[in-house]
Amino acid sequence: MSITRRRFVLTSLATPIAAGIASQIATQSATATAPAFLRGGLNQSSKLRVIKVGVGGMGNADLSEIMKHKMVEIVALVDIDQRQLDGWTKDSTNEKGETKKAALPNVPTFRDWREAYAKLGNGFDAVCCSTADHMHAPISMAAMNLGKHVYCQKPLAQGAWENRQLAAVAARMPNVVTQMGTQRIATKWRQYGGQLLREGAIGPVKEIHAWTNRPAGWWPQGNPRPTGSDPIPAELSWDLFLGTSADRPYKDGYTPFNWRGTIDWGTGAFGDMGCHMLDVPFYELDLGAPISALCTPVKASSDQFPESESVVVKYAPNKMTSKNGLTLNWFDGGQFPDFKALGLPEGWEGGEDGKKVVKGDGGVILVGEKGTMWFPIEHAWARIFADGKPVELKPGEFSQTNHWHNWVDACLAGKKDACVSRFEKGGKMCESLSIGAMSCLEPGKVLEYDAAKCVFKNSAVASAALKRTYRKGWEVTNL
Ligand SMILES: NC(=O)c1ccc[n+]([C@@H]2O[C@H](COP(=O)([O-])OP(=O)(O)OC[C@H]3O[C@@H](n4cnc5c(N)ncnc54)[C@H](O)[C@@H]3O)[C@@H](O)[C@H]2O)c1
């Protein structure tokens, strides 16, 4: 998605990078004192003072939603791209010559989140992170190390180790409120699907089949690493985009948006869309770390995730699964589960507003010992099939919540458990997604996962992506 397709007017400005601040943040302890807000910080109005990191793309939506809460004050905007910052702080003119007033003209801006954290010190209570995936963990962990609340986009983090650590640190900080940005979990359709699973409507679950049509031309995957370099736009801090990841020359088109297909920065279609579809099943079935993963790719590449793939991820049994455990069959890029073999139609009448539910761009099928459930992402109630025929279900009343305000309210009330997608839960699921996504680095081989060490027992190359070495100077305590 090009920047010109967004609502921003281009201008240029340079902000110097703060030197040495990373090490300052890195030395903070994860058991630091409670956030400034809970300690009665600088802001006497008791508003939640939020630093917004990443303000373009989904950061736009995150900022807009969080700002709507009347007890929120945005105290700083951070983005590596000045054009994105200007979109919030400077008036703009559209193609018709109409002027749009800036929404946040007086909010301080930074290119470097480390500089913002250090400058604001006790002047902020929380961070909302909507950057490229590889920076989720450093930005969120550094905030938690300072005792700040965090809302972080999905996937919670890129590598299995980062996910594990974010969940563990969040768990041991009673005053830090966290939320992963899977806002679809708040919809009535997904609440109902969760209820059915909790009530054991399909019995112990044996298999999950999940699919997305992405990347579907939305972003590139399956290509070799580009050669050469392009001039870095004056508005872009390329070194700050790279952050913890390995150094590489800038090429046009890496950012915004397209980074998600590159192994250094994203999690591919699996990590990107898996979060939206698998969160409720993972949370309700209480799935832990997988045992193994096997990727069968089309157009594998050592630089990008495959053009398309199927991945088989295996789990040990628990009280919600069949006694033989559970197998997750993942498909992306135009591959689908075998609906016929599952005894299912490829769609059904009865979606929201009378629309037909089709296999379309994604969904989840759960095979239980008592029935098979098709769990659409949204806009349709889950449906259970027994012997190929739909079972009559009567969804009750569900009140839709605002996922962002769920987090803000929990921060204000000091009730971390009120968040439906807190890091303890999100991190556990995203550890699995990381294992599935990174298994493409050694395709065609059953990779055995060593959960204690967070590595594959039999693949050094894929293990390196589960537990990454950060670029020198970018180390963060607890990661
Ligand atoms: N919950 C959802 O429905 C949803 C939808 C889209 C994207 N997302 C997630 O949101 C995140 C961003 O995705 P996107 O599509 O908006 O990407 P994007 O590249 O369009 O936007 C990211 C923004 O963050 C900025 N940025 C990148 N690295 C940064 C850094 N280190 N510090 C500060 N700013 C930085 C970029 O300049 C850009 O403005 C991803 O993790 C993605 O998975 C979630």
Image (cartoon, rainbow, N blue to C red):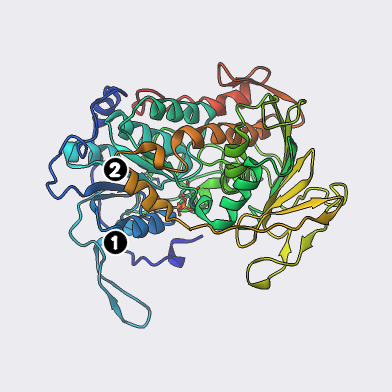
Q: Is residue 332 visible?
A: no
Q: Position of residue 345 (x, y in %)?
A: 83, 58
Separation of marks 2 and 1 at Cα, in angstroms? 29 Å
- When the figure is inspected, residue 29 is found, relative to residue 119, above or below; the finding is above
Numbered-mark total: 2
Q: Is mark 2 within 8 Å of ligand 1?
A: no
Tell me, yes or no, if residue 327 can be seen here.
yes
Q: Residues within 10 Å of mark 1 (few under 14, many from 20)?
A: many
Distance from mark 1 CB to nearest ligand 1 atom below 8 Å: no
Which residue is drawn at the image coordinates 20% and 36% (left, top)?
36
Please give left or right for residue 89 compared with residue 407 in the image: left
For residue 168, what is the image quadrant? top left
Which residue is under mark 2?
413
Tag shown at residue 88 = 1
Picture coordinates of residue 187, whole percent (x, y): 53, 56
Which of pointers 2 and 1 indicates the residue nearer the eye?
A: 2
Rendered residue at 39%/67% (across/down)? 7
Can you give x and y, in whole percent of width and height, for residue 477 in the image?
A: 35, 23
Task: State which quadrant residue 60 falls in.
Answer: bottom left
The answer to which quarter of the image holds residue 32 is top left
Disc on the earlier residue, 2 or 1: 1
